């Protein structure tokens, strides 16, 4: 029975299983995003995120002269980044939108939503 099931599975072409749109996410390197984090204690943080080549991220809260450098990585449609070893975020990316959650060492949680501004 197992051999028959294995044979039947091998006979089905991969094209019969389309890849979901979220799994077709484009690489984040060279992109700029605008959106916000809403933290569990009520703070809303409007941000611009710039994903640079080599896993560097600029995390800009919009205050003159204030921005943070973070690191990021992408695996398919999932992007994870860490800011100043203090907060970590994970998001699912579709073509021009990403949504996700984050938390920091102060035990605050965040939900986020960002839209793509432009590609470099």
Image: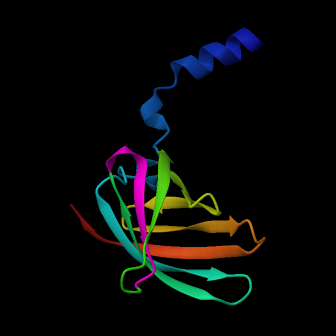
Q: For this rendering, which residue is in front, 35 or 98?
A: 35
Nearer to us in this view, 28 or 44: 44
Picture coordinates of residue 83, whole percent (x, y): 55, 62
Residue at the location (46% across, 44% down)?
A: 19
Whether 104 is among the magenta residues is no
Q: Which residue in the rendered view is the most extreme toward the left?
A: 120
* Residue span colored magenta: 53-62
Residue 96 in the image: x percent, y percent? 37, 67
**How many numbered badges does the structure rendering display?**
0
Left or right of 72, for residue 101: right
Residue 80 placement, left or right of 51: right
Residue at the (69%, 67%) spot, across then down: 103
Q: Which image quadrant is residue 106 in? A: bottom right
Which image quadrant: the C terminus? Answer: bottom left
**Which quarter of the figure is the N terminus placed in?**
top right
Residue 33 in view, yes or no: yes
User: How is the structure coloured here?
Assistant: rainbow
- Indicate the position of residue 15 as horizontal and vertical percent values: 42, 34
Above or below 9: residue 99: below
Q: Where is residue 6 in the image (x, y as percent from the top left)?
A: 66, 15
Q: Does the magenta stretch include residue 61?
A: yes
Q: Residue at x 42, y 48 (%)?
A: 55
Q: Residue at x 60, y 22 (%)?
A: 9
Vertically, is 97 above or below 3? Answer: below
The quarter of the displayed image where residue 90 is located: bottom right
Residue 10 lies, with reference to residue 109, above or below; the image says above
Residue 77 visible in the picture: no
Q: Depth check: 85 or 81 in front? A: 85
Does 15 appear above or below 84?
above
Left or right, 45 with respect to 52, comes to right
């Amino acid at each position: 029975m197992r051999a028959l099931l294995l044979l039947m599975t091998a006979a089905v072409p991969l094209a019969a299983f389309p890849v979901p749109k979220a799994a077709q996410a484009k690489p984040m390197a060279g992109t700029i995003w605008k959106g916000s984090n809403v933290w569990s204690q009520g703070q809303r943080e409007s941000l611009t995120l710039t994903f640079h080549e080599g896993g560097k991220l600029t995390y800009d809260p919009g205050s003159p002269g204030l921005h943070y450098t973070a690191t990021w990585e992408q695996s398919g449609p999932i992007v994870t980044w860490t800011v100043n070893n203090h907060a970590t975020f994970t998001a699912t990316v579709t073509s021009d939108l990403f949504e996700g959650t984050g938390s920091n060492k102060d035990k605050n949680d965040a939900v986020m939503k960002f839209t793509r501004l432009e590609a470099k």
